[in-house]
């Protein structure tokens, strides 16, 4: 858990863009900048747990904690070093992205987590050096497997909705490999139910409202075991 020293300002998006979760910028007592959201809500659990599970699967994501400010608890995500929020120009030159494979591997993770909200706005660049960057995957708060009633919430999501949307989906579709990434499938399948449950328990201990975390762990373990089939359905749906 991270203690927040100040909550400074809302996050400003591009003109015309409205963030559904109303993220804010905060400063931690550790001197780091955080993006916070989900005050005392399920969103805080799904964001932090989603980041940690995605990291365990091998994706580049920001470090996420539960942040406490007064009596309130939030998802608190560390700012990416050298943040590049306008990512599209970089995506037009994929040779300048050091972890290009993550652009497709995140589809596997979003399928596993039942996150149907991947778009251009929840990718950011970081660590710019020598004209290249890393791409970080952010915003896992809408992962249905990590919200209340995870089995019910996940059951109605069709495979086509797990491909990234709008401009990002079109760009990835045009350059899509003929076969889905396999290494990340192996990594996710390699996570035991005990490992998944322990990661979720650590978050729930800092956010006691997340009483459903064991159900989420059970669902994610089941989805991991059939992830090849689930991802293939997403791959073929677009």
Image: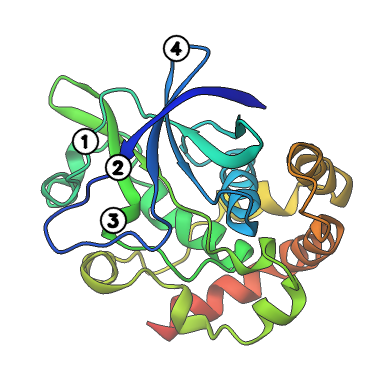
How far apart, in angstroms, are the residues tagged by discs 4 and 3?
Answer: 26 Å
Q: Nearer the viewer, mark 4 or mark 2?
A: 4
- Comparing 69 with 187, the one in front is 69
Q: Are marks 1 and 2 in contact (CB under 8 Å)?
A: yes
Few, some or many residues within 10 Å of mark 3 (<14, 14–19, 20+)? many
Q: Secondary structure at mark 4?
A: loop
How far apart, in angstroms, are the residues tagged by discs 3 and 2?
Answer: 8 Å
Q: Position of residue 206 (x, y in %)?
A: 75, 36
Q: Residue furthest front?
A: 70
- Residue matched to label 1: 84
Say which quadrant the N terminus sits in: top right
Q: Secondary structure at mark 1?
A: loop
- Residue matched to label 3: 121
Q: Are marks 3 and 2 in contact (CB under 8 Å)?
A: no
Q: Secondary structure at mark 2?
A: strand
Q: Position of residue 219 (x, y in %)?
A: 78, 67
Q: Earlier in the sequence, mark 1 or mark 2?
A: 1
Q: Secondary structure at mark 3?
A: helix
- Comparing 232 with 116, the one in front is 116
- Residue matched to label 2: 124
Q: Is residue 25 toward the left or the right of residue 133 in the image?
A: right
Q: Going 54% across and 75% down the picture, which residue do you hit?
A: 232
Q: Is residue 20 toward the left or the right of residue 169 in the image?
A: right
């Amino acid at each position: 858990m991270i203690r927040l020293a100040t909550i400074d300002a809302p996050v400003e998006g591009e003109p015309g863009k409205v963030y559904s979760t109303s993220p804010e910028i905060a400063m931690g007592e550790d001197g780091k900048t955080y993006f916070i959201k989900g005050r005392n809500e399920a969103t805080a659990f799904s964001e932090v747990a989603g980041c940690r599970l995605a990291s365990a699967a091998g994706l580049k994501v920001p470090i996420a904690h539960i942040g406490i400010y007064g009596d309130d608890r939030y998802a608190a995500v560390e700012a990416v070093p050298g943040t590049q929020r306008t990512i599209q120009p970089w995506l037009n030159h994929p040779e300048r992205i050091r972890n290009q494979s993550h652009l497709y591997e995140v589809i596997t993770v979003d399928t596993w987590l039942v996150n149907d909200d991947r778009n251009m706005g929840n990718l950011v660049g970081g660590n710019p050096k020598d004209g290249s960057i890393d791409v970080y995957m952010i915003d896992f708060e809408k992962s249905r497997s990590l919200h209340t009633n995870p089995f019910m919430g996940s059951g109605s999501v069709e495979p086509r909705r797990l491909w990234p949307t709008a401009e990002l989906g079109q760009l990835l579709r045009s350059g899509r490999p003929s076969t889905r990434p396999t290494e990340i499938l192996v990594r996710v399948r390699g996570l035991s139910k005990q490992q998944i449950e322990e990661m979720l328990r650590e978050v729930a201990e800092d956010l006691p409202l997340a009483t459903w975390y064991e159900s989420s762990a059970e669902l994610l373990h089941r989805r991991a075991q059939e992830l090849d089939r689930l991802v293939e359905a997403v791959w073929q749906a677009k």
